[in-house]
Amino acid sequence: MRLLIVKTSSMGDVVHATPVLNDLRRHHPQAEVDWLVEAPFAAIPQMHPGVRRVLPMSWRKWRKQLAQPATWRAMGELRDQLRAGRYDGVLDLQGLLKSALWARQAGAPVLGYDGASARESAAAWFYKHRVAVPKDLQAVQRCRLLAAAHLGYRVEGPPDFGLRAPSVTWQPRSAYAVLIPSASRPEKLWPERHWVAVGKRLQERGWLPVVLWGREAEQTLAERIAASCDGDVPPFLRVGEMAAVLAGAEVVVGLDTGFTHLAAALGRPTLGIYCDHDPGLAGITGNGRVASIGGKGQVPGRAEVLALMARQLDA
């Protein structure tokens, strides 16, 4: 069986879909699996040995440049790559109109959610085969159940992400813990002074606080926090390089962002801080010691986070 998985974004959502790969290897060991994903997140499926080929796309850029001939050429080239895969089926784990339309470009039967289960009900119009998966399930479980229903097996046991971080390119100077104080929206942020307190508490346990960043504005914040708790700030790291740093951490404390979810998927003790919405169905999930705190209108206090972190580390 040759299968294309469509899960294009965001980083956390792509991470949450990867346990499907281990389920497939268990029940369909001969399956050849490719993955269609937004280019910035291509490193995630590339970390899994169950993926034969990753097909990066740039829809987020293309949709803003639809008047340019180069955009249509690039989309045509991707469509040709998808059709050249000669897939037996396309599994749309995203359930959005955009993912369904791109899934159709492969020219193979598309497997997806029914109209009541998809995140955008119109997506179901483009699926040849549809199944119902309750919306009130955790994101990882929804992906696993969708794949199992279409491919003829039962979901068994806890999710196994199976991700293998690449080799380290930047190494902290001693045993370390990771802080992730930046997020995609200002509403998700946690007060800077609280991060400094977390960093100092980690220092007391003998770990170097390593403060991660991605954009220039985030680097400035990371440097201020690190300077206040005698921490360290890495140079700019790509997704795979960031994964290598996360994989070596003693503990990771981060906001609701893709890298925090990735740390949990890599098996690290992880604490996710939620300031803008409830963890609910997209809370921190992993096989190690993981926890989520906070929620919509419930920004957690410094003492709450420090207490939960202590319970995790002493468990």
Image: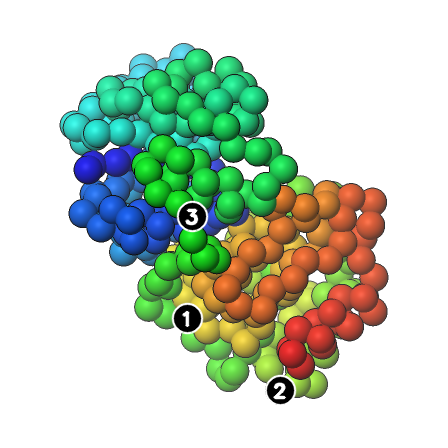
Report the residue at 46% width, 19% height from top: 124
Report the residue at 17% width, 28% height from top: 86
Q: From the viewer's perspective, is the residue at label 1 or at label 3 nearer?
A: 3
Q: Quadrant of the C terminus?
A: bottom right
Is residue 162 toward the left or the right of residue 264 in the image?
left
266, 244: nearer the viewer: 266
Is residue 194 toward the left or the right of residue 227 in the image?
right
**Residue 22, above or below 153:** below
For mark 2, does the 10 Å Cα neighbourhood hold few (<14), some (14 to 19), or many (20 or more) residues?
few
Residue 307, horizontal then vertical, whole percent: 78, 72
Q: CA distance from mark 1 to mark 3?
A: 38 Å
**Of label 1 and label 3, which has the lower sequence position?**
3
Q: Amino acid at mark 2?
A: Gly
Residue 261, horizontal then vertical, whole percent: 54, 55
Is residue 300 toward the left or the right of residue 179 in the image?
right
Asked whether residue 205 is in view, the answer is yes
Is label 2 in a helix, a strand or a loop?
A: loop
